[in-house]
Image: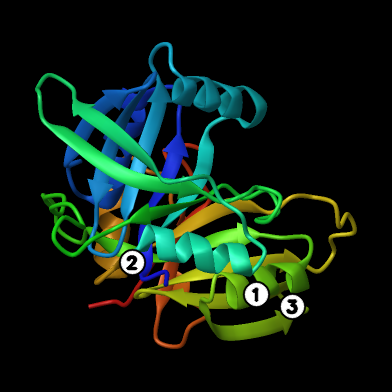
């Protein structure tokens, strides 16, 4: 059983700059800075998930994979990780549904400038079965997870993730993956020619995995990809003012598609991640 979104991984060239930008965007300080296996990472732990910003820093297999990703695709979203309380049981269930995965592996990150360590037990789903999207499973026990929350230090911060957007050229195939195989609850399946898109919403914890299909797309061979993030705030007007004063290029506030909400777009300082902020006005 997938209980929640554990984290989303973002790869960048300049970790210091990305950390500063996301600290300002989210309105909180990171709660982890670690390094291992050729990568350095900064972790923002929000209420319903974490953002893991990763940059290569030396030799190591993970560093090599991140360098390859950056060389091929540039900065942006890299992987999505779902939490499960029993990794072995979940791997077995997914294998029976046609999604093989790697064996459980222990990942360690050592605090930069200190000796504290963090450990994760993970498994990587077959990229063929996930149609190109990098999806991880993370064993998350109640005793150890999630990590302590990042500290908010501004007004109108982002209190969590509202939804993560994954694009697909084959919506029926994606529906089978996220609904039937990963067993996420479908909450919406809507096609709107005015939007030029078919959108499917799958519930995961208290956020949404949104699958988006461009109705004008003609190439069914394009792999699925993690595309964008929508952050949740309690006061969208105050958040808009805060980011404007912090030097972000943001759109005007506009009505959201969900009744009673307002949204705005963050156009820069997001490491090439299409970014939306959603909330209500106080």
Compare residues 140 and 225 and report the one nearer the observer: 140
User: Dot 3: few (<14), some (14–19), or many (≥20) neighbours within 10 Å?
Assistant: few
Q: Nearer the viewer, mark 3 or mark 2?
A: 2
Q: Is residue 137 above or below residue 115?
A: below
- Return the x and y of residue 4 as percentages of the image width and height: 36, 67
Inter-mark Cα distance, 3 to 2: 25 Å
Q: Is residue 38 above or below residue 144?
A: above
**Does residue 196 appear in this view?**
no
Q: Residue at x 36, y 64 (%)?
A: 84
Label 2 element class: strand
State the image quarter where residue 19 is shown. top left
State the image quarter where residue 197 is shown. bottom right
The mark nearer the N terminus, 3 or 1, is 3
Residue that sits furthest to the top in the current view: 59
On the image, numbered disc 2 is attached to which residue?
232
Q: Which labelled disc corresponds to residue 87? A: none
Inter-mark Cα distance, 1 to 2: 19 Å
**Callouts 3 and 2 close, C-beta under 8 Å:** no
User: Dot 2: few (<14), some (14–19), or many (≥20) neighbours within 10 Å?
Assistant: many
Label 1 element class: strand
Residue that sits furthest to the right in the current view: 218
On the image, numbered disc 3 is attached to which residue?
194
Q: Residue at x 31, y 31 (%)?
A: 41
Question: Where's the C terminus, which quadrant?
Answer: bottom left
On the image, numbered disc 1 is attached to which residue?
199
């Amino acid at each position: 059983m997938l209980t929640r979104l554990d984290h989303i991984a973002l790869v960048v060239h300049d970790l210091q700059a990305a950390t500063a930008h996301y600290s300002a965007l989210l309105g909180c300080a990171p709660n982890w800075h670690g390094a291992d296996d050729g990568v350095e990472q900064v972790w923002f732990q929000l209420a319903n998930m974490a953002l893991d910003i990763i940059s290569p820093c030396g030799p190591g297999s993970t560093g090599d994979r991140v360098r390859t990703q950056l060389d091929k695709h540039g900065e942006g979203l890299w992987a999505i990780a779902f939490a499960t309380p029993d990794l072995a049981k979940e791997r077995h269930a997914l294998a029976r549904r046609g999604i093989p995965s790697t064996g459980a592996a222990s990942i360690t990150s050592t605090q930069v400038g200190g000796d504290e360590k963090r450990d994760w037990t993970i498994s990587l789903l077959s990229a063929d079965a996930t149609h190109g999207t990098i999806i991880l499973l993370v064993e998350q026990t109640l005793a150890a997870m999630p990590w302590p929350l990042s500290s908010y230090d501004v007004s109108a911060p982002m209190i969590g993730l509202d939804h993560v957007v994954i694009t697909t050229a084959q919506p029926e195939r994606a529906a089978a993956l996220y609904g039937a195989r990963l067993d996420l609850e479908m909450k919406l399946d809507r096609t709107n020619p005015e939007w030029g898109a078919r959108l499917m919403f799958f519930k995961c914890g208290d956020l949404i995995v949104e699958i988006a299909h461009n109705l004008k797309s003609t190439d069914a061979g394009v792999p699925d990809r993690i595309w964008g993030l929508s952050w949740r705030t309690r006061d969208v007007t105050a958040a808009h003012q805060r980011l404007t004063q912090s030097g972000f290029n943001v759109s005007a506030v506009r009505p959201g598609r969900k009744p009673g909400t307002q949204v705005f777009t963050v156009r820069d300082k997001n490491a090439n991640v299409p970014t939306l902020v959603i909330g209500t006005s106080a």
